[in-house]
């Protein structure tokens, strides 16, 4: 099983990159928190990691609009929830998760800009003053709520993939 590469989130331009999650994270008729938690529990069979599926521009040499990302990565959702990486990182920090989020590069043939967002706990420093962190196997309630808040814009998907 290949070990997925992690995005370097220490670069300011990377924090300003658009991040997309399929669906309407502000749909009052759906239990969005539960949907996120159920989706987080799905293990990526190709990479062996847990997290949420998101789309982020994999071509870091140039920025991409959500329109361009939707065109390059056809998904079934009629709505897209948008944010920037920095906003997601800050929302999770305010929810008590420190500043550690990991975004793994997990492309597939149909989704070249696919990434996996994993939420980590940040534990107190150990005796060697090295931070300890553990990936969550299930998405905690307050992390799901923070993600919903961070994805503050919902738009129509300009290129929804037709269901078979």
Image: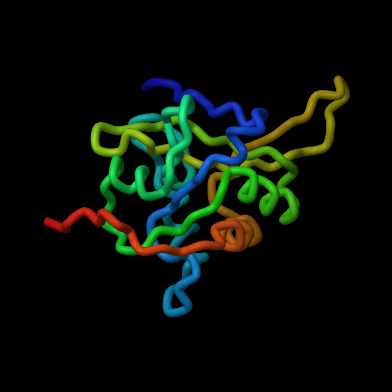
Q: Vertically, is 156 above or below 15?
A: below
Q: Vertically, is 129 above or below 55?
A: above
Q: Is residue 156 left or right of residue 149?
A: left
Q: Is residue 164 left or right of residue 18?
A: left
Residue located farthest toward the left when viewing the structure as drawn? 164
Quarter in which the C terminus is drawn: bottom left
Q: Is residue 68 left or right of residue 100?
A: left
Please tell me which residue lies in front, 155 or 7: 155
Residue drawn at (56%, 62%), measured in percent from left and top? Answer: 152
Residue drawn at (41%, 63%), measured in percent from left and top? Answer: 155
**Within the image, what quadrant is residue 108 found in?**
top left
Quarter in which the N terminus is drawn: top left
Please tell me which residue lies in front, 63 or 73: 63
- Residue 110 screen position, x and y as percent: 24, 37
**Within the image, what quadrant is residue 101 found in?**
top right
Residue located farthest toward the bottom when viewing the structure as drawn? 29
- Residue 151 screen position, x and y as percent: 54, 58
Residue drawn at (42%, 31%), measured in percent from left and top? Answer: 58
Please tell me which residue lies in front, 83 or 121: 83
- Residue 60 screen position, x and y as percent: 48, 28
**Within the image, what quadrant is residue 109 found in?**
top left
Q: Total label count? A: 0
Q: How is the image coloured?
A: rainbow
């Amino acid at each position: 099983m290949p070990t997925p590469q992690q995005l370097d989130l220490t670069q300011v331009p990377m924090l300003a990159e658009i991040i997309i999650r399929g669906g309407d994270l502000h749909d009052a008729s759906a239990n969005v928190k539960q949907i996120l938690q159920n989706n987080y529990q799905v293990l990526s069979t190709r990479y062996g990691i847990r997290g949420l599926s998101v789309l982020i521009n994999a071509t870091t040499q140039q920025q991409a609009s959500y329109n361009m990302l939707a065109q390059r990565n056809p998904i079934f959702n009629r709505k897209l929830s948008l944010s920037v990486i920095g906003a997601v990182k800050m929302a999770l920090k305010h929810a008590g998760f420190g500043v550690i989020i990991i975004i793994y590069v997990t492309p597939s043939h149909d989704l070249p800009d696919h990434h996996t967002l994993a939420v980590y706990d940040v534990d107190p420093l150990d005796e060697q003053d090295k931070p300890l962190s553990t990936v969550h196997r299930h998405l905690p309630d307050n992390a799901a709520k923070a993600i919903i808040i961070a994805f503050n814009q919902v738009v129509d998907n300009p290129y929804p993939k037709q269901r078979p």
